[in-house]
Amino acid sequence: MSIPQAEALPPSPPRLILASTSPYRRALLERLGLPFDCMRPACDEDAYKRVILDPRQLAETLAWVKAESVAKLEPSAVVIGGDQVCVCDGTIHDKPGTAARAVEQLETLQGRSHRLLTAVCVVAAGRGRFHLDETTLHMRALSRQAIERYVERDSPLDCAGAYKLESRGIVLFEQIDTADHTAITGIPLLALTSILNELGFSIP
């Protein structure tokens, strides 16, 4: 009597790690329905910001450094790093950190157009796969009183550009030009899904 051979199980996908503790990026990645872990990257962002003046290069470099710092600790994992740069007329606007700085940033951006550059880097087996998404946002003309009221209600202190578009910040804008609205929150999911599919992850 022949003994039936057990069917070989398909290989399980590698561990997926988000090199970020951002609640916004975590919520975005959860939308893909994949199990993943979060790890804080070892990255001195201010050191890079002092020497890299080109906004695109800065966003891509920080996304790579964040992902690579975690990949060194977990070399068998697939690691996702991301970064976002807000730029208006060549000036980079960082996360404000305080309500006063948030009001100052929004006073600079109101009535004008600016760009959000969102970079994602996926490191697998020592190789980085990059995508950079560029969004142009046209902010309404706003009074200081309206800006202060918005900052008090939405508290966008940890957001580049000092607004939360996924929350009350949407009312600040009259037009948004983007290929992927998820990039505005922190990760371009359209590009990331394509990259992860290429790496063997099943989505959906």
Image (cartoon, rainbow, N blue to C red):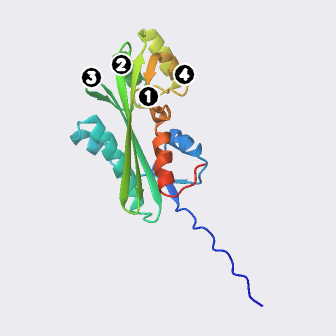
Q: Earlier in the sequence, mark 2 or mark 4?
A: 2
* Image point (43%, 12%), residue name: 140
CB under 8 Å between discs 2 and 1: no
Which residue reaches farthest front?
A: 1
Which residue reaches farthest right?
A: 1
Q: Amino acid at mark 2?
A: Ser
Q: Earlier in the sequence, mark 2 or mark 1?
A: 2
Q: Which residue is mark 2?
A: 113
As measured in the structure, the alpha-carbon distance from the residue carrying label 2 to the one carrying label 1 is 13 Å
Give the mark toward the camera: 2 or 1. Answer: 1
CB under 8 Å between discs 2 and 3: no
User: Label 3 crowding class (10 Å Cα cut-off): few <14, some 14-19, many 20+?
Assistant: few
Badge 1 element: loop
Q: Which residue is mark 3?
A: 89
As measured in the structure, the alpha-carbon distance from the residue carrying label 2 to the one carrying label 3 is 9 Å
Which of the pair 24/150 is nearer the observer? 24
* Image point (46%, 58%), residue name: 78
As measured in the structure, the alpha-carbon distance from the residue carrying label 4 to the one carrying label 3 is 25 Å
CB under 8 Å between discs 3 and 1: no
Q: Which residue is mark 4?
A: 168
| Label of residue 46 in the image | none
Q: Quadrant of the N terminus?
A: bottom right
Q: Earlier in the sequence, mark 4 or mark 1?
A: 4
Badge 3 element: loop
Q: Amino acid at mark 3?
A: Asp
Q: Amino acid at mark 4?
A: Arg
User: Label 4 crowding class (10 Å Cα cut-off): few <14, some 14-19, many 20+?
Assistant: some
CB under 8 Å between discs 2 and 4: no
Which of the pair 127/168 is nearer the observer? 127
Q: Which residue is mark 1?
A: 178
Residue 178: which quarter of the image?
A: top left
